[in-house]
């Protein structure tokens, strides 16, 4: 249980900030609570709040959520290696709590061997409880906090920066990141709306894949 | 805001978030992803994050901007360094928020 504290500590201010933003965007507390329970994915929830406030359609929000959270499929596949011979009910429940942070923690522990599925589940659920509590608390105290105070509107870019840096495991990934940044800015400037997230991430990943394959074949 | 629409949006988001978390785990009983899909997928987290981040830092009101009073961009540089050096989720987010608050205090 002690292992989960960095995640809980990390989630609390981010969750609070999300609640405040949601409150300022006009979302009621029950919607934030429902979203934290049903979705439980930080970046997608932030994007949803921003998109809802800007009047985006339900389809663009759901599609963006799908693309943003598709990375969990990769994490789910990687975790599956350590959850062989586990019954389906456990997996059905466990899968709900896969986030970037819980995945990073659980995967590292599973790899080092001193971990079991029940501890991993506790990490997931503790993180979830803190997330629900802090986001709802944010909507309730949000009205007392002026817009942009304490740099709360930077919680999301800050989190993206952090998670992006964690993703840059080799020099090639830096190239991938720059490619995606470049394409997303071009896409954002040329095509109105929020399709740049989907468009840039898929095309930059495909380009990176092709470049990597080309380099490998040439060697 | 239309409450029914908000409710439906959240339900839709929940479904498309939960399925990618669950299905690979259920389907991959002992099997692995084909190597080329796995390799392609390994780029996705980085590209999604960079795509989410870049326009927010470098564009304002639909236009590219590199102005020196762009607090978000200025704060991003030390925030990147903190994330790189200390690998701390909390520390990075707190640094970014603190710098933006500080930047606004000086620029406004």
Image (spheres, grey):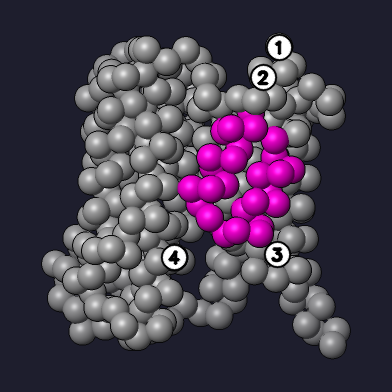
Region rendered in magenta = B75-100
Residue ID for mark 2: B104
Q: CA distance from mark 2 to mark 3?
A: 33 Å
Residue ID for mark 1: B108
Q: CA distance from mark 1 to mark 3?
A: 37 Å
Q: Secondary structure at mark 4?
A: helix
Q: Give the foreground label among 4 and 2.
A: 2
The answer to which of marks 4 and 3 sits earlier in the sequence is: 4
Labelled pair 1, 2 in contact (Cβ < 8 Å): yes
Residue ID for mark 3: A173
Residue ID for mark 4: A104
Q: Position of residue B85 (x, y in %)?
A: 66, 59
Host chain of mark 1: B
The reply to whether label 4 and label 3 mark residues of one chain is: yes
Labelled pair 4, 3 in contact (Cβ < 8 Å): no
Q: Residues within 10 Å of mark 1 (few under 14, many from 20)?
A: few
Host chain of mark 2: B
Labelled pair 4, 1 in contact (Cβ < 8 Å): no
Q: Give the foreground label among 4 and 3.
A: 4
Give the quarter of the figure containing the C terminus of chain A: bottom right
Host chain of mark 4: A
Q: Position of residue A82 (x, y in %)?
A: 32, 81
């Amino acid at each position: 249980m002690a292992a989960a504290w960095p995640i809980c500590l990390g989630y609390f201010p981010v969750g609070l900030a999300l609640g405040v933003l949601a409150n300022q965007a006009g979302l009621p507390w029950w919607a934030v609570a429902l979203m934290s329970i049903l979705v439980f994915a930080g970046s997608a929830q932030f994007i949803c709040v921003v998109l809802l406030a800007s009047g985006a359609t339900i389809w663009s929000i759901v599609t963006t959520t799908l693309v943003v959270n598709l990375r969990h499929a990769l994490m789910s596949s990687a975790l599956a290696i350590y959850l062989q011979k586990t019954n389906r009910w456990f997996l059905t429940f466990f899968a709900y709590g896969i986030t970037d942070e819980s995945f990073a923690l659980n995967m590292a522990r599973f790899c080092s061997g001193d971990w079991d599925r029940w501890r991993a589940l506790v990490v997931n659920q503790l993180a979830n409880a803190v997330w629900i509590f802090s986001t709802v608390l944010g909507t309730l105290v949000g009205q007392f906090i002026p817009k942009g105070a304490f740099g709360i509107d930077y919680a999301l870019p800050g989190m993206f920066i952090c998670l992006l840096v964690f993703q840059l495991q080799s020099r090639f990934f830096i190239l991938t990141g720059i490619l995606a940044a470049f394409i997303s800015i071009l896409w954002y400037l040329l095509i109105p709306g929020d399709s740049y997230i989907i468009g840039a991430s898929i095309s930059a990943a495909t380009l990176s894949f092709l470049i990597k394959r080309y380099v490998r074949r040439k060697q | 805001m239309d409450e029914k629409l908000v409710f439906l949006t959240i339900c839709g988001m929940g479904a498309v978030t939960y399925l990618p978390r669950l299905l690979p785990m259920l389907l991959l009983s002992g099997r692995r992803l084909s190597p080329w899909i796995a390799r392609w997928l390994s780029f996705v987290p980085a590209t999604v994050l960079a795509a989410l981040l870049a326009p927010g830092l470098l564009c304002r009101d639909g236009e590219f901007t590199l102005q020196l009073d762009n607090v978000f961009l200025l704060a991003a540089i030390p925030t990147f360094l903190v994330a790189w050096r200390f690998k701390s989720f909390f520390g990075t987010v707190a640094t970014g928020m603190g710098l933006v608050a500080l930047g606004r205090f000086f620029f406004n």
